[in-house]
Image: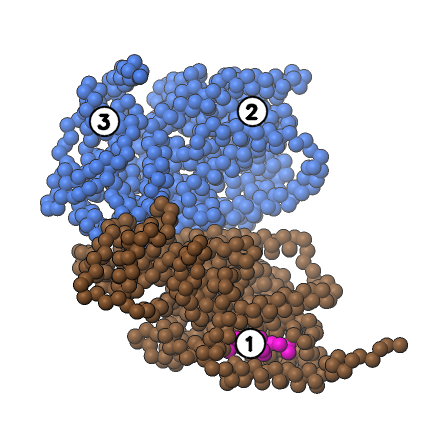
Chain colours: A blue, B brown
């Protein structure tokens, strides 16, 4: 047996032992906290280096690029701008995006993979004093931290990264389409993606969804290249892209399945495994993912089971029927409230069965398939596995505002399915203009007005509330105040000292010390009050109540939903002596209701509200 | 037939005559600088004429550089390829932008940088080498009503005043000058590194110095350190060029560069010595005496430097000694400063602006360089030009550093004094470049260390830049006060400061110190009822007096009972509270005696 193959098997065995046996969960998490940044740096540098080598090998292919048409660049630029034009930059999904920002912040300041839990301006510079390892993979926060490193820390860097990734994604989509069936297919792929309001929402947000899509397409394209060239440099780039993809989103580790199958198939068909030292150590490069994944066993709350009552397992086959119903509700929504693209959904639902048949046919004749088609067929297994996993997920309902973004890989699958199916039909080359017209019509008729209204972002009031907090910070640029807010991380990531309400109650003495000695120019409290639908009376929920010891004066107040009022108050005095805990707040009507009752009362109130508009 | 040259020209062409004239010039300079001029006359001369002498020196230097460029020899033996040039330019631009973007443009060292800016202010408006103590808007013109000759060399203020001359007065110019000097410094580091070992050596020097936060800190400040660093590098580059092919144009540029270097920092006068030695070495290597006309002026152009030092030596008030320190220089300070240097160079926190990589590699490089120097010194006649220049300047930098170690306030671990280590870091970088070039014979050390330097930047320097804790030494308070006052409705104000009047005077806002306010309370009471000032603001500090806080105004900042104030703004800095109040009434006590003419205050700084 090839000595290098033995080494590869040895590193794989070592990786399994180190990743799953050798370290306790606590030790694993500590390794990720202190080594996560460096692991991402190493992976990124290796990937960058492998891409440089690939580009060097492809220099001959690039000659004559000046003679190539320029409209694809204009198309990508125009479509990218369209995606960015309609929605303001902001945090769209909370706390996910803020947690990612927090990790990037700690990576920038301390090179540790922690979300800051405490931070204060102590001697002039804002110092992060405590933090916690987040469950989210580290590649996206790492890239944001590099942006911080190169341009200075600012929360908006997370949006800058997604802006750049938007154009990169469209470029990769174009190239993927070209690989499948020429420039027409590339253009249609770009147009289909542009018609997706969900993509526009994420392009102007701070999540890791766009990076995930970019890495999926990059891995697919490198897989196509590897099958075509079968050389060591292509293999390295392909493998490293897969590893980085696994470090982008939790479930994207599934794409290692097509990556592995592709490599094994090439080795098998060539009758020899081509191995370099980088390939040999690749199993060890998966260690950060394996160790990080233990966060789910240490903290069962990471599964967020509590957010959806009635579920006891994160994954189950029994969730599939319900999820399919919700997913269809998302894909076929015509009123624009779900950020779906109707034209993509309709074409995709038609294209997916054809794509499945095409995949089966291609897999059977893999040896005679073109490299691009062979790679795509193998990758289709990854797309299928990904979709199946989400269907088994307890919270895999795409019509839920927080979950919609999980449909992005499936939307991408639809784009590829449409393009692949159309390339099989072709209709004497007329299919691409026809599809472009259909997509354009769908875009102008449905997607564009949906993007313009972007009700799907506005209805998620937590995001708007977050923007409101950022408005407050912009209006108080000295950032020398303390916020008492249960979502303290939001403030800390914006370099404002903050502590949760529970801490303010438990550590009242400390707050009094700070208040008396003017450690902060002001102390503010953020609360979300409930509205009694019958009386209109406002009541402070127990978790937002600092208790009677804190005398508050309202500074800013805004109603984000009919049933809640968000309020920022200034602490004007704090009563000394033993802490008087907040009385268990008499729940407002809304708090006593079931979600269905609440929705009914919300609809009634909304009707009343419309009637009484002046 | 050629016309015979006139007698003066014929005499000038004779080497012995020119040598004699240089001797006369040197003797005259020594007499003027150290013997023949009284302290008072020296002060007046530097204050009134220093600007013009420096202007002439600078113009001559630029002219010498121009002539050097025009008479440059054929293209270099190993010109940079396009790819190499792109990589180097990219590295210089990126590291410069990272450094410039790492911190806001604001002062770093209280109050040194304000003093330099104040001297630039007076040079721009009045051509006086003097800093402002008081200033008022009189009939629409902001006039400096009290000023005195500062101890700091004034090449940096001169450059800032030049930027004011060319673009209009604004305090920001002082920072922009330093920001522009950053790529110049890295560019010169590349050139000298390339002269030493080739383009890879130059690139390594750029990476090592580019990942030094101390340089970034100075690139966004308004101090004279970066200019000093640039001038040392410029002198080294010119010296290497002169030794490579000794000629008049190169020596003229080198001599004038040495004069400007001597005007860049106090102790930089030391570098005149290696320049003189290298000039002689060039004569030996060329087998002839090279004496360009400009060299005749060099001793005389150094006279203001000597005169300013004379004024400083006779003005103990300017030494700013602490209660513990009786003299400025003493061997007694050496052990503590050595310990401080070790703590600074090998610090692993983000609170200091060191580069652990440069310190560790540099120390090894320095030891190796010293050993090489001892081994190869006997062959100095045939030694590589850049190596010889490095040896001479390396000894001067060592002497400079040892001198600094004997200074009472030079512990590098003190964030106010870290900047004195910049020349030492330059020596470290050169040592590393030489050492890795030697190691390249066995394995690609230069490439490996360049890559390590880039990784080090991402892993460590970026964190130091991110928090830049080394720059929070009191200046945040001044910047906050400025922001607060500038956010108030426009109009003339008198600022009574507890720190320095300079930040306000530089913005053409009248300001006096609290001590003076106590003495001139009657005038303040008068101004309260006059329309000259829209309001009178008072800046004070409060500190905790018990473990529970119980903040009180510090005694030095307290005002007599009769001063009635209302709070405008308050902010904590560390454990201290800064407070801005408005003077609303002033009741003079019955026994108040108006002061005649209170003495102007002397601002404090490190040096």
**Front one among A489 and A151:** A151
Query: CA gap, disc 1 to disc 3?
Result: 78 Å
Q: What element carries label 2?
A: helix
Residue appearing at x 44%, y 48% in the figure? A152
Q: Which of marks 2 and 3 is nearer the N terminus?
A: 2
- The subunit carrying tag 2 is A
Q: Which residue is tagged 2?
A: A191
Give me the disc on residue B302.
1
Q: Main secondary structure of the magenta part?
A: helix
- The subunit carrying tag 3 is A
Query: In the current view of this chain or complex, which residue is farthest to the left?
Result: A578
Residue appearing at x 89%, y 77% in the figure? B1
Label 2 or label 3, whichever lies nearer to me, is 3
**Front one among B341 and B30:** B30
Q: Which residue is tagged 3?
A: A530
Residue appearing at x 48%, y 39% in the figure? A161
């Amino acid at each position: 047996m090839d000595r290098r193959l033995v080494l590869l098997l040895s590193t794989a065995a070592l990786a399994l032992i180190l990743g799953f046996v050798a370290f306790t969960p606590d030790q694993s998490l500590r390794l990720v906290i202190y080594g996560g940044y460096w692991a991402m740096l190493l992976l990124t540098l290796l990937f960058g280096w492998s891409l440089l080598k690939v580009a060097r090998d492809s220099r001959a292919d690039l000659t004559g690029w000046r003679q190539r048409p320029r409209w694809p660049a204009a198309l990508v630029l125009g479509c990218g701008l369209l995606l960015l034009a309609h929605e303001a930059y902001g945090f769209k999904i909370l706390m996910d995006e803020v947690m990612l920002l927090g990790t990037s912040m700690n990576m920038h300041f301390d090179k540790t993979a922690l979300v800051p839990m405490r931070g204060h301006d102590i001697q002039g510079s804002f110092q992060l004093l405590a933090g916690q390892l987040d469950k989210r993979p580290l590649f996206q926060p790492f890239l944001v931290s590099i942006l911080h490193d190169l341009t200075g820390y600012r929360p908006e860097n997370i949006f800058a990264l997604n802006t750049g990734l938007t154009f990169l994604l469209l470029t990769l989509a174009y190239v993927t389409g070209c690989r499948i069936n020429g420039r027409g297919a590339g253009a249609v792929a770009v147009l289909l993606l542009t018609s997706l309001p969900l993509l526009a929402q994420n392009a102007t947000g701070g999540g890791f969804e766009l990076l995930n899509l970019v890495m999926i397409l990059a891995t697919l394209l490198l897989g196509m290249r590897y099958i075509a060239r079968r050389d060591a440099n292509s293999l390295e780039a392909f493998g490293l892209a897969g590893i980085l993809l696994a470090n982008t989103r939790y479930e994207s580790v599934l794409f290692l399945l097509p990556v592995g199958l592709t490599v094994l198939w090439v080795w098998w068909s060539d009758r020899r495994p081509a191995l370099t030292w980088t390939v040999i150590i690749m199993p060890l490069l998966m260690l950060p993912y394996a160790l990080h994944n233990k966060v789910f066993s240490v903290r069962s709350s990471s599964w967020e089971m509590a957010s959806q009552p009635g579920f006891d397992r994160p994954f189950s086959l029994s969730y599939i029927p319900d999820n399919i119903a919700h997913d269809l509700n998302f894909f076929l929504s015509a009123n624009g409230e779900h950020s779906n693209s109707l034209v993509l959904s309709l074409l995709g639902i038609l294209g997916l069965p054809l794509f499945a048949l095409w995949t089966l046919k291609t897999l059977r004749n893999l040896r005679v398939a073109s490299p691009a088609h062979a790679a795509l067929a193998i990758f289709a297994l990854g797309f299928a596995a990904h979709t199946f996993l989400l269907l088994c997920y307890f919270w895999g309902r795409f019509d839920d505002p927080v979950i919609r973004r999980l449909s992005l890989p499936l939307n991408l699958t639809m784009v590829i399915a449409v393009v692949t199916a159309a390339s099989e039909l072709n209709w004497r080359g007329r299919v691409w203009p026809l599809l472009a017209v259909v997509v354009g019509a769908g875009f102008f008729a449905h997607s564009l007005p949906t993007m313009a209204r972007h009700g799907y972002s506005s209805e998620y009031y937590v995001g708007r509330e977050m923007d409101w907090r950022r408005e407050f910070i912009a209006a108080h640029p000295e950032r020398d105040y303390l916020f008492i807010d249960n979502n303290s991380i939001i403030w800390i990531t914006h370099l404002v000292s903050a502590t949760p309400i529970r801490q303010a109650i438990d550590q009242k003495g400390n707050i009094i010390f700070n208040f008396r000695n003017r450690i902060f120019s002001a102390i503010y409290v953020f609360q979300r009050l409930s509205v009694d639908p019958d009386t209109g009376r406002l009541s402070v929920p127990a978790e937002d109540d600092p208790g009677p010891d804190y005398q508050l004066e309202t500074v800013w107040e805004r109603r984000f939903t009919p049933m809640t009022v968000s309020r920022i108050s200034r602490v004007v005095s704090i009563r000394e002596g033993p802490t008087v805990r907040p009385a268990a707040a008499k729940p407002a009507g809304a708090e006593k209701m079931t979600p269905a009752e609440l929705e009914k009362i919300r609809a009634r109130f909304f009707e009343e509200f419309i009637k009484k508009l002046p | 037939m050629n016309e015979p040259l006139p007698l003066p020209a014929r005499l000038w062409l004779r080497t012995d005559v020119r040598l004699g004239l240089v001797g006369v010039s040197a003797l005259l300079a020594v007499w003027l600088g150290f013997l023949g001029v009284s302290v008072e006359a020296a002060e007046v001369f530097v204050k009134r004429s220093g600007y013009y002498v420096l202007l002439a020196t600078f113009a001559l230097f630029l002219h010498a550089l121009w002539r050097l460029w025009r008479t440059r020899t054929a293209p270099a033996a190993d010109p940079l390829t396009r790819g190499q040039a792109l990589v180097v330019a990219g590295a210089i631009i990126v590291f410069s932008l990272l450094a410039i973007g790492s911190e806001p443009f604001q002062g770093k060292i209280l109050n040194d940088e304000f003093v330099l800016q104040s001297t630039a202010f007076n040079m721009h408006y009045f051509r006086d080498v003097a800093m402002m103590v008081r200033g008022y808007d009189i009939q629409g013109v902001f006039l400096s009503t009290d000023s005195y000759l500062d101890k700091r060399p004034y090449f940096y203020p001169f450059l800032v005043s030049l930027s004011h001359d060319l673009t209009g007065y604004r305090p920001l110019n002082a920072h922009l000058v330093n920001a522009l000097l950053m790529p110049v410094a890295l560019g010169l580091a590349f050139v000298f590194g390339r002269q030493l070992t080739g383009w890879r050596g130059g690139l390594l020097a750029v990476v090592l110095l580019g990942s030094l936060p101390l340089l970034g800190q100075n690139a966004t400040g308004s101090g004279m350190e970066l200019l000093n660093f640039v001038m040392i590098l410029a002198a080294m580059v010119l010296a290497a060029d002169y030794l490579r092919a000794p000629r008049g144009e190169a020596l003229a540029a080198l001599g004038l560069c040495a004069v400007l270097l001597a005007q860049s920092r106090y102790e930089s006068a030391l570098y005149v010595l290696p320049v003189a030695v290298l000039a002689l070495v060039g004569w030996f290597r060329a087998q002839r005496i090279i004496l360009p006309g400009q060299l005749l002026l060099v001793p005389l152009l150094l006279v203001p430097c000597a005169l300013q030092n004379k004024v400083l030596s006779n003005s103990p008030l300017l030494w700013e000694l602490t209660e513990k320190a009786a003299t400025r220089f003493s061997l007694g300070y050496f052990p503590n400063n050595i310990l401080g240097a070790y703590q600074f160079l090998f610090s692993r926190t983000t609170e200091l602006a060191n580069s652990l990589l440069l310190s560790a590699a540099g120390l090894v490089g320095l030891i190796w360089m010293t050993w090489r120097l001892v081994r190869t010194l006997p062959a100095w006649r045939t030694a590589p030009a850049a190596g010889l220049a490095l040896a001479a300047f390396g000894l001067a930098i060592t002497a400079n550093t040892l001198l600094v170690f004997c200074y009472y306030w030079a512990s590098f671990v003190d964030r106010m004094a870290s900047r004195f280590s910049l020349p030492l870091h330059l020596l470290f970088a050169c040592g590393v470049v030489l050492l890795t070039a030697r190691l390249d014979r066995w394995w690609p050390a230069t490439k490996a260390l360049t890559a390590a330097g880039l990784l080090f930047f991402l892993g460590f320097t970026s964190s130091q830049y991110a928090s830049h804790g080394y720059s929070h030494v009191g200046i945040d308070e001044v910047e906050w006060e400025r922001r607060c006052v500038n956010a108030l409705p426009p109009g003339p104000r008198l600022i009574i400061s507890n720190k320095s009047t300079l930040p306000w005077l530089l913005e053409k806002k009248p300001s006096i110190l609290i001590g003076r306010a106590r003495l001139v309370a009657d005038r303040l009471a008068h101004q309260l009822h006059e329309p000259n000032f829209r309001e009178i603001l008072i800046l004070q500090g409060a500190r905790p007096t018990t473990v529970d806080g119980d903040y009180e105004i510090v005694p030095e900042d307290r005002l007599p009972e009769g001063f009635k104030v209302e709070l405008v703004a308050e902010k904590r800095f560390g454990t201290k509270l800064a407070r801005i109040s408005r003077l609303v009434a002033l009741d003079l006590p019955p026994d108040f005696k108006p002061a005649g003419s209170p003495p102007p205050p002397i601002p404090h700084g490190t040096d």
